[in-house]
Protein backbone atom coordinates (compact mmCIF):
# COMPACT_ATOMS: atom_id res chain seq x y z
CA UNK A 1 0.00 0.00 0.00
CA UNK A 2 1.48 3.34 -0.99
CA UNK A 3 2.08 6.00 1.63
CA UNK A 4 1.79 9.68 0.87
CA UNK A 5 1.70 12.89 2.87
CA UNK A 6 -2.08 12.39 3.23
CA UNK A 7 -1.88 8.64 3.83
CA UNK A 8 -3.43 5.73 2.02
CA UNK A 9 -6.26 3.64 3.34
CA UNK A 10 -7.85 0.54 1.92
CA UNK A 11 -11.46 -0.49 1.62
CA UNK A 12 -11.59 -4.28 1.64
CA UNK A 13 -14.42 -6.46 0.47
CA UNK A 14 -14.43 -10.18 -0.15
CA UNK A 15 -14.18 -9.54 -3.89
CA UNK A 16 -11.88 -6.55 -4.28
CA UNK A 17 -9.39 -4.18 -2.75
CA UNK A 18 -9.77 -0.50 -3.49
CA UNK A 19 -6.92 1.81 -2.53
CA UNK A 20 -7.74 5.51 -2.51
CA UNK A 21 -6.11 8.66 -1.21
CA UNK A 22 -8.36 10.97 0.76
CA UNK A 23 -7.90 14.37 2.31
CA UNK A 24 -10.21 13.71 5.28
CA UNK A 25 -11.27 10.68 7.27
CA UNK A 26 -14.93 11.50 6.61
CA UNK A 27 -14.35 11.33 2.84
CA UNK A 28 -12.83 7.87 3.20
CA UNK A 29 -15.70 6.53 5.27
CA UNK A 30 -18.35 8.12 3.03
CA UNK A 31 -16.73 6.58 -0.06
CA UNK A 32 -16.91 3.05 1.32
CA UNK A 33 -20.47 3.17 2.56
CA UNK A 34 -21.76 5.04 -0.51
CA UNK A 35 -20.39 2.14 -2.56
CA UNK A 36 -22.79 -0.19 -0.70
CA UNK A 37 -20.38 -1.78 1.77
CA UNK A 38 -21.74 -2.95 5.12
CA UNK A 39 -18.29 -3.01 6.72
CA UNK A 40 -14.95 -1.34 6.09
CA UNK A 41 -11.69 -2.95 7.15
CA UNK A 42 -8.21 -1.52 7.00
CA UNK A 43 -4.90 -3.31 7.46
CA UNK A 44 -1.64 -1.55 8.15
CA UNK A 45 1.84 -2.02 9.49
CA UNK A 46 1.51 -2.30 13.27
CA UNK A 47 4.17 0.41 13.70
CA UNK A 48 2.36 2.88 11.43
CA UNK A 49 0.94 5.20 14.07
CA UNK A 50 -0.20 7.83 11.56
CA UNK A 51 -2.46 5.41 9.67
CA UNK A 52 -3.72 3.99 12.97
CA UNK A 53 -4.70 7.53 13.96
CA UNK A 54 -6.64 7.91 10.68
CA UNK A 55 -8.48 4.67 11.41
CA UNK A 56 -9.44 5.91 14.86
CA UNK A 57 -10.64 9.25 13.40
CA UNK A 58 -12.86 7.18 11.08
CA UNK A 59 -14.37 5.59 14.17
CA UNK A 60 -12.75 2.24 13.41
CA UNK A 61 -11.94 -0.25 16.15
CA UNK A 62 -8.70 -2.21 16.28
CA UNK A 63 -9.34 -5.95 16.07
CA UNK A 64 -5.75 -7.06 16.66
CA UNK A 65 -3.13 -8.52 14.37
CA UNK A 66 -3.92 -10.66 11.32
CA UNK A 67 -1.92 -12.44 8.65
CA UNK A 68 -4.97 -12.97 6.42
CA UNK A 69 -3.75 -10.51 3.77
CA UNK A 70 -0.37 -9.92 2.15
CA UNK A 71 1.36 -12.85 3.89
CA UNK A 72 2.53 -10.84 6.92
CA UNK A 73 1.16 -9.78 10.29
CA UNK A 74 -0.72 -6.51 10.06
CA UNK A 75 -2.88 -4.48 12.42
CA UNK A 76 -6.53 -4.68 11.43
CA UNK A 77 -9.24 -2.06 12.03
CA UNK A 78 -12.95 -2.24 11.19
CA UNK A 79 -16.18 -0.25 11.28
CA UNK A 80 -19.70 -1.31 10.32
CA UNK A 81 -22.36 0.75 8.58
CA UNK A 82 -24.63 0.29 11.61
CA UNK A 83 -21.99 1.90 13.86
CA UNK A 84 -21.79 4.95 11.60
CA UNK A 85 -25.56 5.30 11.38
CA UNK A 86 -25.79 5.16 15.19
CA UNK A 87 -23.44 8.16 15.57
Image (spheres, rainbow, N blue to C red):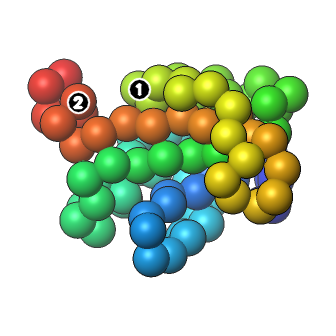
Q: Is residue 17 left or right of residue 85?
A: right
Seen from the viewer's position, the closer of residues 14 and 27 is 14
Q: In this view, does 2 lie to the left or right of 30?
A: right
Badge 1 vs badge 2, beta-carbon distance below 8 Å: yes
Q: Position of residue 14 (x, y in %)?
A: 44, 68
On screen, residue 29 above or below 15: above
Q: Where is residue 57 in the image (x, y as percent from the top left)?
A: 49, 25
On screen, residue 73 above or below 84: below
Q: Position of residue 33 (x, y in %)?
A: 28, 55
Q: Which residue is drawn at 80% across and 42% down?
A: 73
* Residue at the extreme bottom of the image, as rendered: 15
Q: Where is residue 10 in the image (x, y as percent from the top left)?
A: 58, 57
Q: Is residue 20 left or right of residue 70?
A: left
Q: Would residue 6 be seen by someone viewing this image from the given angle? A: no
Provide the secondary structure element on which disc 1 rests: loop
Give the position of the N terminus as an image quadrant.
bottom right
Seen from the viewer's position, the closer of residues 42 and 29 is 42
Residue topped by disc 2: 83
Give the position of the C terminus as an image quadrant.
top left
Residue topped by disc 1: 59
* Residue at the extreme left of the image, as rendered: 86
Amino acid sequence: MAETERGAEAVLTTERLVVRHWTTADQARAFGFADGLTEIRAVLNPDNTRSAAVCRRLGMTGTGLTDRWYGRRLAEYRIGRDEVEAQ
